[in-house]
Amino acid sequence: MSNNESSKSNKQGKPEGKPAGKYPVNMTETAFPMRGDLAKREPQWVKEWQSKKLYQRIRQASAGRPKFILHDGPPYANGEIHLGHAVNKILKDMIVKARNMAGFDAQYVPGWDCHGMPIEIQIEKKYGKNLPVAEVQAKARAYANEQIELQKKDFIRLGVLGEWDNPYKTMNFSNEADELRALGTILEKGYVYRGLKPVNWCFDCGSALAEAEVEYQDKRDPAIDVGFPFAEHDKIAKAFGLSKLPTDKGYVVIWTTTPWTIPSNQALNVHPEFDYALVQTERNGKPTLLILANDLVESCLQRFGLEGKIIATAKGEALSLIAFHHPLATADKPMLANSSNASANSFCVSVTGTPA
């Protein structure tokens, strides 16, 4: 509004506003409040979005577009949400809304993980231990549903749009049935086999523990080098391209940070593609042969306080299945060419193989 217009309006008897400034600015008049006051306004907006079914209307408006579906990696149905939950859900909501504005039918499918020890522990705290299995399952299912409703309310309050009326739950009977069907298909195709794997066990809960549930106390243990005496001299000579070994006394040397595993050692490992050296040296005045990783010969001899020279080299594959005497047991142990279990970038010459 110009100064002339302002003076005219005053002459017409309208209430006089602020005095005209020296540099008048044309400002639009809006109903926007001066203060954001989000603590009061946000709940109203969220309530309006839910009552108007905004998410469903967006789905209808986006029908026929290329689909973008964010199937949520589920939070655990236990306890109130925390800052980590908020960051996770808000970032995902930003991605979904951005993809929707980019021309996709962007859908967000929330869900919850309803199985595991945390829920069972809560049931034990509330009702005691040694309840019948069926009763534990019923109480755990009810508890999980309560937690889901509490968390869902908070996620909606964050302004996250999604399939909140139809989330997936791992405890839904249809999901559990599908899991069994999928496992049956995997079994039919022969992908399941019986093997050995260490399983952490909780003596208090009487159940297995996930890796993330195990905390380790820091402990300093000695790293040691151990010599496994030669047992099959002719095979070793052949592996290194020699007609005969210059001496019968020799060792393949392993390095380990878990010396307590040596008594149960079942095999030695070498990398099939690494080079290994047959080193001639003297120990206690007697000629001795050592099998070491070729790249580590100098550092190993220095650590052992020995001098020596390489007389032959061979790939780890050539040493496969050659037996060596165990330093503590009577049975000989074979050498295994195993790329996943052997390393030559540390002090390791060949590593011990112990049973799981």
Image (cartoon, rainbow, N blue to C red):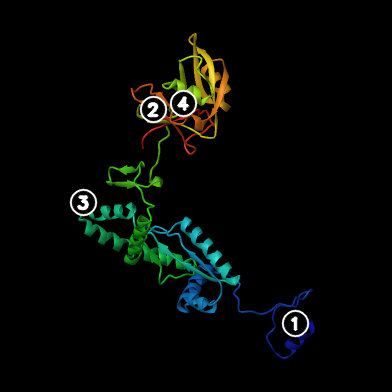
- The kind of residue on which mark 1 rests is Met
Is the residue marked by circle 4 packed among few (<14), some (14-19), or many (20+) residues within 10 Å? many
Q: Residue furthest bottom?
A: 12
Q: Label 2, label 3: how many angstroms apart (C-alpha)?
A: 46 Å
Residue 65: x, y in percent? 56, 75
Q: Secondary structure at mark 4?
A: strand
Q: Label 1, label 3: how many angstroms apart (C-alpha)?
A: 80 Å
Depth order, front residue of 125/241: 241
User: Which disc number belongs to residue 254?
Assistant: 4
Q: Secondary structure at mark 1?
A: loop
In this rendering, the count of numbered labels is 4
Q: Earlier in the sequence, mark 3 or mark 4?
A: 3
Residue 337: x, y in percent? 47, 34
- The kind of residue on which mark 4 rests is Ile
Q: Secondary structure at mark 2?
A: strand
Q: Nearer the viewer, mark 3 or mark 4?
A: 4
Task: Give the residue drawn at x 50%, y 27%.
Answer: 349
- The kind of residue on which mark 3 rests is Asn
Quadrant in the rendering for residue 199: top left
Q: Earlier in the sequence, mark 2 or mark 1?
A: 1
**Picture layout, residue 60 above or below residue 284:** below
- The residue that label 3 is drawn on is 130
Depth order, front residue of 102/9: 102
- The residue that label 1 is drawn on is 1
User: Which disc number belongs to residue 333?
Assistant: 2
Depth order, front residue of 221/69: 69
Q: Label 1, label 4: how many angstroms apart (C-alpha)?
A: 89 Å
Q: Earlier in the sequence, mark 1 or mark 3?
A: 1
Q: Label 2, label 1: how many angstroms apart (C-alpha)?
A: 97 Å
Q: Earlier in the sequence, mark 2 or mark 4?
A: 4
Q: Earlier in the sequence, mark 1 or mark 4?
A: 1
